[in-house]
Amino acid sequence: MLRSLFAGISGLRTHQTMLDVTGNNIANVNTVGFKSSAAQFQDSLSQLVQNSTGPRNDAGGSNPAQVGLGVQLAGIRTNFTTGAPQPTGVPTDLMIAGDGFFMVRAGGETLYTRNGGFSFDAAGRLTTVDGALVQGWTAQDGVITAGQAVGDITLPVGAVVPAVATTGATASGNLPSDAAVGDQLVRDIQVYSADGTASTLRLTFERTGTGWDVSHEGGTPTSLAFVNGVQAGPSSLTTTTGITVDLSAITGYADISSVALTGQDGRQAGTLSSYALTEDGSLMGTFSNGDTQVLARISLAGFTNPGGLEKAGSSQFRPTANSGQATIGQAGDEGLGGIISGVLEMSNVDLSQEFTNLIVAQRGFQANARIITTSDEVLQELTNLKR
């Protein structure tokens, strides 16, 4: 049989594969996190018809004469360029602004994806659309320990943050230097015991001949002296309940009476009331007492050769021998990128390029089919030599 006949058949096969790859790209033009692929061809073995010869004194050298035996598929390369961002406004929709991958656990296997369309299930676990569990680190008392193992991310619905006893408070503002001796200013602030019981801390500021005395009921007063409105030195007051009040920010200019107790470090117990995802992948919880804590942090993974990853369906990938092992880190680490909340990464399929590839594949298929019909006509002429 003619070599061209089999070369044409190989061309049909490879261009059919190119059509399959292009068709799959177009079908996934709106698939979140999808990465397009491209078929690459290479020639098959070539049959040597005449060997090459080296140059001689009386004649020049000759090149080898070879006849190709067709085409074959060299590989299908995945394009990992970042797709366009699509704002959704959903806080659990995440996009990686970089080269990292989200880690998910499905069927006991850890897979990797760029599809950040997540949500919480009935058990409070962060999952993908198809139920794979998003991986990361869970905080203990608002702290994520370095080096801890990754695991499922769970929103602790009904979590309670414990009460904290007040140990310090701050005062600021101005005490009027032109006040009459004996004038008093009383300022209050709410403070808390170790079990969260609220009480009122009351300080009395009394004008003296040399400045102001600050006192707490039953305690020893602290004297404040001012030079041109500025305290002569830092000062504080310790109450009978053990709370240290920082008074160093108080000034003593004329005509302004704005002194106040501006803050304290205690709090009541609180329950989780809302959450948000930050750019470093942290799940931040806001509690009813106003406290904010890290609940968990989403982990990201990077690969030396992302092109070596194997597509596992559902816009997920699994590592192979040529992708290298996953390097696990968090958003912001070098090479992984940051996380954008409320945005999804769309498919990186370029429709104009894919339709062009369709035309190229179609014409290539037609040309190779013409090789087969032409070879068939040649064979027909040969068979017609014997009548």
Image (cartoon, grey):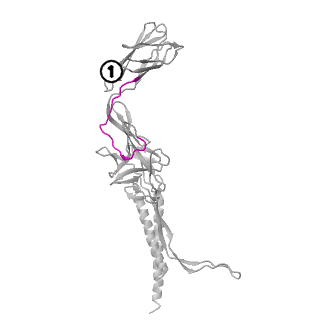
Amino acid under disc 1:
Ser
Q: Position of residue 51 (x, y in %)?
A: 59, 80
Residue 32 higher or lower than 64, as above or below: above
Residue 334 falls within the magenta-colored stretch: no
Q: Position of residue 259 (x, y in %)?
A: 44, 17
- The residue singled out by tag 1 in the image is 199
Q: Please state which of residues 329 and 218 is positioned toward the viewer in this rendering.
A: 218
Residue 120, by quadrant, is top left
Q: Please state which of residues 283 and 223 is positioned toward the viewer in this rendering.
A: 223
| Crowd rating for badge 1 (residues with CA inside 10 Å; few <14, some 14–19, many 20+) | few
Q: Is residue 190 visible?
A: yes
The residue depicted at 37 percent of the width and 44 percent of the height is 92
Q: Residue furthest right?
A: 57
Count the marks: how many? 1
Prevalent SS, magenta region: loop
Residue 155 falls within the magenta-colored stretch: yes
Q: Which residues are magenta?
A: 145-168
At mark 1, the secondary structure is: strand
Residue 152 higher or lower than 212, as above or below: below
Q: Residue furthest left?
A: 122
The residue depicted at 37 percent of the width and 51 percent of the height is 104
Q: Is residue 343 visible?
A: no
Screen quadrant of the C terminus: bottom left
The residue depicted at 43 percent of the width and 54 percent of the height is 347
Q: Position of residue 4 (x, y in %)?
A: 49, 78
Q: Please state which of residues 364 and 299 is positioned toward the viewer in this rendering.
A: 299
